[in-house]
Amino acid sequence: MNKTITGLIALDFDGTSAVYEPQMAMHSGVMNVLAQLRDKGYGWVLNSDRYTDTLLEIAQRLPVELRPDAVMSAQRFIHTRSNGSYEPLQPWNESRMELHRDLWQDISPCFDVWQREIESNFTIRDCVVNDVVFAYMVPAEENESLRLLMSNYIRPWPQAQLSGNHEWSFILHSDFSKAALLKHYCVVLGITTDKIIAVGDGFNDITMLDSGLTPQTGCPSDACPEVITAVRAGGGYVAGCGGPEGTIEVLRFYHGSTDD
């Protein structure tokens, strides 16, 4: 670390801090607030279920002084910043891969049967099934039924869990979560998790929006219903705006920043 971090901002990407035109990137208004908080001792991390390479590319397009201190991906990996570039945090990352490989060895023989049933009964908008991911995207109105079916698939394996966001549902190891990444990273930093301000909008963000991790949680107004319920239940802040503007509102609520 280049300087002592006294607080940590943890941001989801899609639906929380992202823009997509002219290319996928961090929202400029969110970055302006993060720059203000940098000057006051806050670090920040990008904590998303997107692939590591995608997130690192997004991070490295930012000015060096504004890049996240860590990139957290797929609820399992941590890459930490050193002089503007990123290195995998070991042995943590390798331990996550070992857990994943053991789980996939157990459940992957079932994938063909699971896929046939899912693809026969749901409107498939996209899917990724390989040695890293088992994930399906269906219309929102079909999500609940799909998640119930996928939960039934993995019931014999207590080391597996179902996660997802607004559109995707996917299987991963039960030890993986956005909260687990933040807890480990706080140990690395030598700070307590109550120093975190966490903002997210999807089902997969709920673990890091739990008041047991940090009391400083928030979400945009268009977050999924489960997130809004979790944030309110923990005494967090639900913004009046959606998307990145809502994230800015959350950060200003907790830090009192009013500059644009």
Image (cartoon, rainbow, N blue to C red):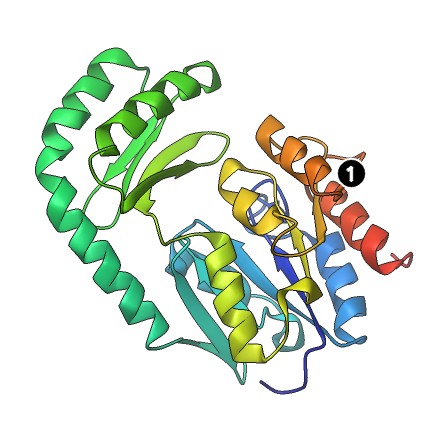
Q: Position of residue 186 (x, y in %)?
A: 56, 71
- Residue 60 seen in this snapshot: no
Instruction: Locate the N terminus and report the quarter of the image it occupies.
Output: bottom right
Whether residue 26 sits left or right of residue 180 in the image: it is: right
Residue 220 vertical position relative to residue 212 in the rendered view, above or below: above
Mark 1 surroundings: few (<14), some (14-19) or many (≥20) residues within 10 A:
many
Q: Position of residue 210 (x, y in %)?
A: 61, 47
Instruction: Locate the C terminus and report the quarter of the image it occupies.
Output: bottom right
The residue under the point 61% across, 56% down is: 213
Whether residue 214 sits left or right of residue 157 in the image: it is: right
The residue under the point 60% across, 70% down is: 67
Task: Check the image and name the residue furthest to the left.
Answer: 109
Q: Position of residue 18 (x, y in %)?
A: 60, 47
- Residue 165 seen in this snapshot: yes
Q: How many dots with numbers? A: 1
- Identify the image quadrant of residue 236: top right
Whether residue 52 sits left or right of residue 213 in the image: it is: left
Q: Position of residue 108 (x, y in %)?
A: 13, 41
The residue under the point 33% across, 29% down is: 126
The residue under the point 31% across, 45% down is: 172
- Identify the image quadrant of residue 242: top right
Q: Amino acid at mark 1?
A: Ala
Name the residue nearer the viewer: 149 or 222.
149
Whether residue 109 sits left or right of residue 41 in the image: it is: left
Under circle 1, the secondary element is loop
Q: Check disc 1 and report the residue beneath it.
A: 239
